Image (cartoon, helix red, strand yellow):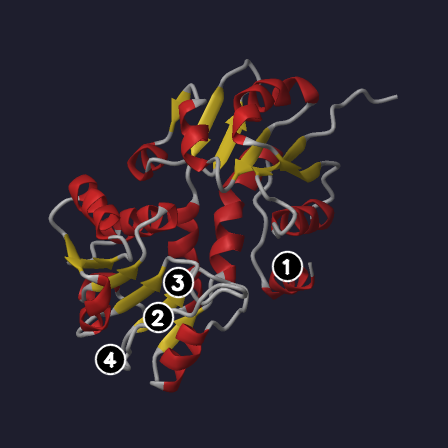
Amino acid sequence: MSHEKIPLAGVLGSPISHSRSPALHGHWLRSLGIRGFYVPMDVTPGDLSQVVATMPRMGFVGCNVTIPHKEAALALADQVSDRAALIGAANTLIFRPGGGVHADNTDGYGFMANLRANAPDWQPSAAPAAVIGAGGASRAVISALIEAKVPEIRLTNRTKVRSEVLRREFGARIVIYDWVDAGRMLSGAGTVVNATSLGMTGKPELKIPLDALSSDALVTDLVYTPLETPLLAAARARGCRVVDGLGMLIHQAVPGFERWFGMRPVVDDTVRDVILKA
């Protein structure tokens, strides 16, 4: 009789019941024939450190962390990847066999992989990018765009002070626009990213005039409920290439799964269908 441990992973957040990650990882585990499990865990901020410290003893090889734990998770790690340090947040924890917690952030990777897969001829370095929102997701997007050599990143946020914090951290390539002037920053932009929750089912609409948006631009939304947000629908009507946010969720999950379970999962249309039915 085999005493091989069954590897466990999961996602920590609060709330967590809406997460599509268990469906995604569960599909990959089944399709690769791995005897493992990926479970959603509703954990309050006050319990986070205790939970993370206990998980390796329960057979967990790692976990994802989502809202509101991404910044706090970074402080619990013994080792932090360069990209997680730069973003100032972690979304992936790896528990090392000898003890110790490694923190990584795969959001920027997922963002870029999604765009490269769905718009192969996209040239990020050819024109400025316009980023809407200055929260945690925006930090991952900005660091990825800087690495992709985007010449200028135009940033707008409802509260301007958050944009200013990001300019201090990421440098002079960031140009801040007032929220009321957000439409102006679309002029000449080659890439447009909504990194806010505006336009999501149950949230207010993103009200930015698209008159200055070129039909050559690539427009993407990190929101994936609905799959085609009002922003993407309007951009598509103007002739823009649009990429929905579901691919980012899928691609950001690949490095973590590979580290935890030892096999690299495949991203294909079946995966999208599984998540959309979840």
Question: Label 4 to label 1, Cα distance in Å?
Answer: 32 Å
First in sequence: mark 2 or mark 1? 2
> Circle 4 is placed at which residue position?
214
Helix, strand or loop at mark 3: helix
Q: Quadrant of residue 40?
A: top right
Drawn side of residue 154 relative to residue 58, left or right: left
Number of other residues with Cα within 10 Å of mark 1, as a class: few under 14, some 14 to 19, many 20 or more: some
Residue name at image x 53 percent, y 46 percent: 253
Q: Circle 2 sits in a helix, a strand or a loop, which is it? A: strand
Residue at mark 1: 275
- Mark 1–mark 3 Cα distance, whole angstroms, equals 19 Å
Tell me how far mark 2 sits from mark 4, CA to CA: 10 Å
Instruction: Answer above or below: position of 16 versus 82.
Output: below
First-in-chain label (1 vs 3)? 3
| Count of numbered tags | 4
User: Which dot, 4 or 3, sits closer to the camera?
Assistant: 4
Residue at the far top in the pictured view = 98
SS type, badge 1: helix
Q: Position of residue 98 (x, y in %)?
A: 55, 13
Q: Amino acid at mark 1?
A: Ile
Three-letter code, disc 3: Leu
Upstream in sequence: badge 3 or badge 2:
3
Check if mark 4's residue and mark 3's residue have beta carbons within 8 Å: no
Discs 1, 3 touching: Cβ within 8 Å: no
What residue sits right under mark 3 in the picture? Answer: 115
Residue 219, numbered label: 2
